[in-house]
Amino acid sequence: MAQYYVVGSDSPVARFRETVGGTEEWFGPFGDYESAEREWFKHAWQAVTTGKIRYRIECIDPDDPPPGTD
């Protein structure tokens, strides 16, 4: 069963081409995408004023590992 996580990290500039090491935060797991999306929305809107924190939703499915991990 897939699990969803909200992941956020700081960026030194608003372009988000790189992140600041050691700043990654994980929230979850959530059992469905909609729950993760609600959490993402909450964190993303709190970070709007700074413009240097980016949040994303990651899906981890133990039944379908990423390529090259066998």
Image (cartoon, rainbow, N blue to C red):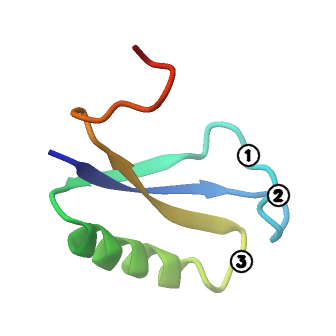
Q: Amino acid at mark 2?
A: Pro
Label disc, if present, on residue 2 of the rendered structure: none
How much space separates mark 2 and mark 1, taking CA atoms?
7 Å
Residue named by callout 1 = 20
Q: Amino acid at mark 1?
A: Val
Label disc, if present, on residue 51 of the rendered structure: 3
- Residue 50 in percent (x, y) is at 69, 78
The quadrant the N terminus occupies is: top left
Horizontally, residue 24 falls left or right of residue 29, namely: right
Residue named by callout 2 = 12
- Residue 65 in percent (x, y) is at 35, 30
Disc 3 or 1, which lies upstream in sequence?
Answer: 1
Residue drawn at 51 percent across, 20 percent down:
68
Q: Secondary structure at mark 2?
A: loop
Q: Is residue 25 above or below residue 16?
A: above
Q: Secondary structure at mark 1?
A: loop
Q: Residues within 10 Å of mark 3 (few under 14, many from 20)?
A: some
Q: Secondary structure at mark 3?
A: loop
The quadrant the C terminus occupies is: top left
Disc 2 or 3, which lies upstream in sequence?
Answer: 2
Q: Is residue 21 above or below residue 5?
A: above
Q: Residues within 10 Å of mark 2 (few under 14, many from 20)?
A: few
- Residue 6 visible at all: yes
Task: Kindly check if marks 2 and 1 are in contact, taking CB atoms under 8 A apart as contact.
Answer: yes
Q: Residues within 10 Å of mark 1 (few under 14, many from 20)?
A: few
How much space separates mark 3 and mark 1, taking CA atoms?
14 Å
Q: Considering depth in this image, is 41 or 46 the residue closer to the camera? A: 41
Disc 2 or 1, which lies upstream in sequence?
Answer: 2
- Residue 36 in percent (x, y) is at 29, 67
Q: Amino acid at mark 3?
A: Gly
